[in-house]
Structure formats: structure tokens, C-alpha cells
Amino acid sequence: MASIIEIEGLTKRYASGHEALKGVDLTIEEGEIFALLGPNGAGKTTMISIICGIARATGGSVTVAGHDIVRDYRGARSAIGLVPQELSTDQFERVIDTVTFSRGLFGKPRNPAHIEKVLRDLSLWDKRNSKILELSGGMKRRVMIAKALSHEPRVLFLDEPTAGVDVELRRDMWTLIGELRQTGVTIILTTHYIEEAEEMADRVGVINRGELMLVEDKVALMKKLGKKTLSVVLAEPLTTVPGELAEWDVALKADGHEIEYIFDTQAERTGVSSLLRRLGDLGIAYKDLNTRQSSLEDIFVSLVHQEKAA
Amino acid sequence: MMLQNLRAIAAIYLFELHRFRRTLMTGLLVPVITTSLYFVVFGGAIGSRMTEVDGIPYAAFIVPGLIMMSMFTESIFNASFGIYMPKFTGTIYELLSAPVSATETIIAYVGAAATKSLIVGSIIFLTAHLFVDVQVAHPFAMAGFMVLIAISFCLFGFILGVWAQSFEQLQVIPMLLIMPMTFLGGAFYSVQMLAEPWRTITFFNPIVYLISGFRWTFFGQGDVGIEFSLLFVAGMLAVCIAIIAWMFRTGYRLKK
């Protein structure tokens, strides 16, 4: 796959002295869904703002579709559609007018057929003559996506697309993003909902305090850093962990009704069978077993913690 | 080179005019009513005691001042609102992320605001005709002067809109600076009527030169020569363009 965005040594220092980005290098492949994951204030929005022309970089360079974002801003920006985090719309305008306006602003000739397609794809066609202020929050978000897609961008930035959106709408959004990807648009989304990255992304980047800590294929990441948790539901509760189980580092949960053991799925010996054997030897009876894959959230938390410890 | 995205200029210009159209009735009715009131109060009440200024009937004498005063405030309000509102609502993200140059942005926003301001100026001119017979000595110069004034004050309004961080700041300059300067700048009287030292002091007010120039296009005479008036308009244009160029170069209050 060819790269569509190349970021090299990107830094951003605000006038206050705050360093929002500390030398970020990142390459985005054309056609992928890339999730930029990080806590609030990690630098996600700053990074997007620089690429899209809303903020200025202090150092480093960015090219979009081969165009430098400063020297050839027209070329770079023409390739980008941006949906910012805040719901900002021209409340008094009609849906179709504001979307048509966006296309003109990006210098594309009028194309009512394309506008209609975008609005239909986003289930906004029936609302095309409504004023934006009459729409619900979720619909307004769609209008912003429609504006971003109106000029046929190759890259779509979605900054926290599901922030403050209810569960059902979030599902809709995920479906929508999946559909957009089918059209070949590269999608970069930021989120602090880990499940969102887990659900949709091909690759995940974790950013914290202005540094890109890791960029990895999502599946590989989960495999590599993935841990599993084994829960053993006991027949009789225990008050303390027997000394004979010390080598497994287990914990008592649910008032002594459960033993929890976290193991590395990639390890040569996971220790699961030996633990169960030992439980049998000790005469500790159990009613049920279950294992659970740790989520990106666990991975993320452990990454952020590692950094804090360092 | 600078103007590549003509479609963006058209899109912004039409968007802004569309915004004006939404408030068309108040937008046009207000200047008509205000003008009529000025004629009733100034033309009727004062004009009956003061029949002529510099050989011109008082009611006719105030017409250029009235047009200028309305155009100053209209231009500043329209242009400052045009750019302040996107900042306030957050929709400015789209303008900043669009392939649009600073020059294109200015042409579109200032062009739209100046258009509205010229429409208002023309309406006041026509309304004035209902009350008084005004002859225009230099009609082309008058039209040209209106265009220059509209552009200069819209540029100024644009700067104000970029600078302002609250609605209060947006109002404070036109209300506390431009309005008094206009009243004291000979909109309703000839500076020659003032006693010293006020006459000399008044000539430090740049608005005097603008109103005087516009009055010259009507009556062939003003408080100062037309060349001084044109010099001040050119100066104002130059200063505004320089400030705006600086704003875009540094991203002042537009980019983080």
C-alpha cells in the first residue's frame, strides 16, 4: 500500500510553553482506518489541527497526498475532509445549502448528484431542506460529516466522532465508517474510547503527553500485548490464598468465591493446566472456569502506567 | 497565483449575502427609518433655525454626512460579524482547513459586507430624496467614494472581528469610537462653523476628511480639499491591508 500522509518530527509548542507534540513520526497508508488513541490532552487534536491547517507546527513536516501542508497547502487541504470534535454548524442554514457551500469552499465545481449521494448515504436526504438547528445532535454530526465528504476527500479526519453520542448512535457511526472505508477513503479517527478503536481500526497509534508511544497493527497488538484472565469459580469460598498457589500470583475475588489468574497467551507455558492440577491436589473444588481476552483498554492502561513508572 | 480558488470566493460571498437576506426587512427598514428620523429632527427642527451652511440648504447639507455615518457603522458591523460569528460558533475550522488563501478570504468577506453597505448607502440616498432636493455635482466621484469608504471600513470591521473575543468588544469600537468621531467630524455641521481651538482640534479627527470628501462629491466643496480626503481614504486602506496581512501571516487570533 502507498502512504497518503507522512509526518516527520512534528512538534508543537504553545505560547504558554506547553509542549503538545514532542517530535511525532507517523505514516498513514492509503485506504486504512487508523485510530489515534490517547487520554484527554495527549495531543490528538493538536496533531489533526496541524495537518488540516487550523494550527501551525513549531517544527517538523507533514505531507498529504504528496503535498507539503505549508508550501502546497492547497493541494494538501483539497485532499482532506475534517470533522472536528465540537459540533459547530451554521444553525440557520439549510442542510443542503451548508453542504453545497463546503464543496464550493474547497474549490470543486457544483455537483448536485454527488451532494445528493452524500446526503443519502448519511440518511440526511429527507432532512435536506431542514434548518440545521431543527436537527438532533446525532444528525448535526452527520451534517458535519457530509460537509467533509462534499468535496470528495481522499483522507477523512474524524476527531472523537462518538464523543457525547449515545450507544445506538455510536453503533450507527461505526457502521457508517465501515461503509466509508469501502469507498476507498482513508480514515483517521481519534478516540479515547478504546472499544471504538478495537471495533474499527486496522492500525492503532497510542499517543500520550505529545509522544507517539506505539503504532501497531491492531490484531498483532492485541496478540502481542494481549493477556488473558482466568477466573476459577470456587465451590467453597476461601479466606486467604493458600501458600501452595504462591508461584502463580493469583488473587481472590468476589469475597473469596473466585480465584483470578492473569496469564500471557504468548508464553511457552501459560501455567493454566498446572494451576488447575494444583487446585485438584489441594482438594479445592471449583464449579466453573472462564477466560477473558484483555482489551485494548488494558493494553493502553498498562502502557500509560509503564511510562509513568519510568 | 494568489487567486486560484474563485469558487471559494463565490461560495463565501453568496453565503454572506444569504445571511443578509435572512434579515432583509430589518436590515433595510432600519436605515430608512433612521434617516427619516434624522430628517425630521435635524432637517425639520434645526433646519428651520439654520437655513444654510456654506450656501447649501441645511437639509441637503446633512445628506452626505448621514450616508457616511450609516455606511461607517454598517460596514463595520457587517464585516466584523461576518468573521466573528464563525469564530464564535466554531465553524471557522472549515475556512481554516479549506484550500483558500488570505487574499481570497478577504475579498469574499469584505466584498460581501461592502456590497450590503453600498445597498444601505444607496437606500439612504434615495430616502433622502423624499425629504429634500439634493443635486450631486460629481455622481461618478460620489459612487467611487462610496465604494472606497465601504471597502475601507469593511476591512476595518474585518480586523475588529478577528480581534474581538466577545460580543461586547465587537460593539465597543463602533459605539465608543466611530460614532462619536462621526458626530464630531462634521456629519451635521461644517467644521468652519466651530470656534478655535475646537476647529484645530477637529482636524485631528480623520473622519472629518472622509465626510468632507464625500460632501465635495455632492456640492463641489468641503471642509478640506478633495485631495486631502482621498489621501486619508488611501491611508486608511493601506493601514487596514497592512494589519490584515500581518494577522494572516502570524495567524493572530485565527490559528493556534
Image (spheres, rainbow, N blue to C red):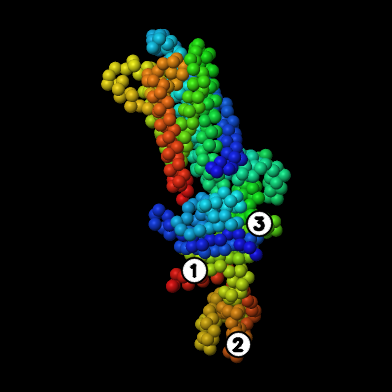
Q: Position of residue A56 (x, y in %)?
A: 48, 53
Residue A91 seen in this snapshot: no
Are dots 2 and 3 on a single chain?
A: yes
Q: Is residue A100 above or below residue B132?
A: below
Q: Which of marks 3 and 1 is nearer the N terminus?
A: 3
Q: 10 Å neighbourhood of mark 2: few (<14), some, or many (≥20)? A: few
Given contact means CB atoms under 8 Å apart, are the residues at marks 3 and 1 in contact? no
Q: Which residue is painted at 52% across and 20% down in the image?
A: B140
Dot 1 corresponds to which residue?
A304
Name which residue type carries label 3. Answer: Val
Given contact means CB atoms under 8 Å apart, are the residues at marks 1 and 2 in contact? no
Q: Which residue lies furthest to the left in this view?
A: B197
**Which label number is shown at residue A274?**
2
Name which residue type carries label 1. Answer: Val
User: Is label 3 or label 1 in front?
Assistant: 3
**Along the line of sight, the residue nearer the viewer: A9 or A254:** A9
Q: Earlier in the sequence, mark 2 or mark 3?
A: 3
Q: Position of residue A245 (x, y in %)?
A: 54, 86
Q: In this view, does A6 lie above or below A225?
A: above
Label 2 chain ID: A
Q: Is label 2 in a helix, a strand or a loop?
A: helix
Dot 3 corresponds to which residue?
A185
Q: Disc count in the image?
A: 3
Q: Is label 3 in a helix, a strand or a loop?
A: loop
Residues at marks 3 and 1, CA–CA distance in whole angstroms:
31 Å
**Which label number is shown at residue A61?**
none
